[in-house]
Amino acid sequence: MDTTLATPEWQTFTERWWNLRPLRLEFAPRGENGPRLEALFYEDRRGRLQLPDYQPHLPMRFRPTPTSASWRVERQWLETARPLVEEMTARGTRGELTLPATMTDPRPWRWAHFRVAPRFTNLIDLPFTWSQADRVVRQQASKAERAGFTCRRTASLDEVLACLGGSQARKRFRYGIGLEGLELAQRLLGPDAFRAYVCHAPSGEPATARVLLHRPGGRALDWMAGTRDPFLRSGATQLLLAHVLQELYAAGAPGYNSCGADVESVAYTKLMWGGALVPQFTIQGYDVHSLRRFAGGWLRFMRHRAATRRARVESVVDPAADAPPGELAAEDAPPDAAGSRRAGGSAGR
């Protein structure tokens, strides 16, 4: 599996920081020469399968036998996914488990009565060119460059944390990883896989930062990002991401995964980079943690519904309400869902 999430170093980090034991599962129903499905899960103390907090997705790889017939590939997928689903059912799960975007058929889990729901992420193929992006993104990056903002990789995690802290305070969420956790990840993964970038203002202050997970040959993952309040409209966010995409391509990454496009205020800014919006499915059993999240979602929906009805009755709907919410610079939400300790990735992640 060509992702940092499948490396022994990432597994060691997850085990030490989140206290979850890695569990690699492989299924080959037809034997060595048949189709194969590999997946890397984590077990909690009760043996339940879990996705670590803010890990974008589960590392998985499906290898069908050579064939040009799509129906054969589909049948092989169903054959190899079935024993994985049975294993998950027997062991039990905790919370959401997000499949990678490459796994596009979640039906075996639906047939086993798991709850299946889509999340979304943006994928950008590299090399990146400005012709892919909206002109506003290009203008913002140019504005920051003209003002004297500069971007570079950094080993200073204090600067990274200062930027991450700005977004966490503003958006009221927590990554759950401070200086000690970042230092552990940096030490275990090494400088090539753990890539921290900072954009500095002309004054030398850190304005925005990103931490990415990279493995040559695989899509780089945008693990964490943050921007300090004074620099939200400076264009520093756009300038840094453009710099990061160039460096990742030079380092051997064929693409970039934004690790989440589910937060409304962030979705509009991410789409302006011209990537492809793709679904990645989440799997949930009916454990207490999942039911609590379901209840919370129902409550938020009912509140939104009541507010919408009141707005209609009072006739105070803003004619410009269809304008994209949020700011262009707000590309610093967590993978998958703001305020959630679950991934992506994410990001929400």
Image: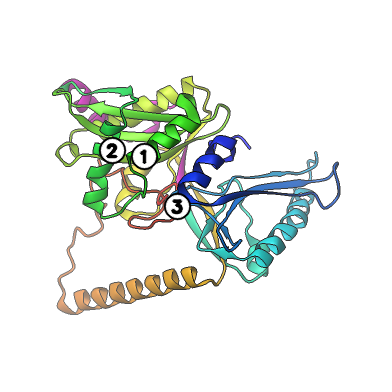
- Label 1 vs label 3: CA separation? 16 Å
Quarter that holds the N terminus: top right
Pick whichever of labels 3 and 2 is earlier in the sequence.
3
Give the x, y percent position of residue 283. 56, 61
Residue at position x 58%, y 28% in the image: 217
Q: Mark 1 points at which residue?
A: 180
Judged from the image, the secondary structure of the residue bearing numbered disc 1 is helix
- Of badges 1 and 3, the one in the foreground is 1
316 on left or right of 345: left
Q: How many neighbours does mark 1 have within 10 angstroms: few (below 14), some (14-19), or many (20 or more)?
A: few
CB atoms of marks 3 and 2 within 8 Å: no
29 on left or right of 165: right
Q: Which amino acid does label 3 sit on?
A: Asp
Q: How many neighbours does mark 3 have within 10 angstroms: few (below 14), some (14-19), or many (20 or more)?
A: many
Q: What residue type is labelled 1?
A: Glu
Give the x, y percent position of residue 107. 65, 62
Q: Which amino acid does label 2 sit on?
A: Leu
Count of marks overlaid on the render: 3
Residue at position x 24%, y 37% in the image: 162
Quick check: can you spot residue 237? yes
Give the x, y percent position of residue 330. 27, 44
Asked if residue 131 lies in the magenta stretch, the reply is yes
Pick whichever of labels 1 and 2 is earlier in the sequence.
2
Q: Which mark is residue 161?
A: 2
- Label 3 vs label 2: CA separation? 18 Å
Q: Mark 3 points at which residue?
A: 53
Q: How many neighbours does mark 2 have within 10 angstroms: few (below 14), some (14-19), or many (20 or more)?
A: many
Q: Give the range drawn in magenta.
A: 120-146
Q: Nearer the viewer, residue 60 or 139?
A: 60
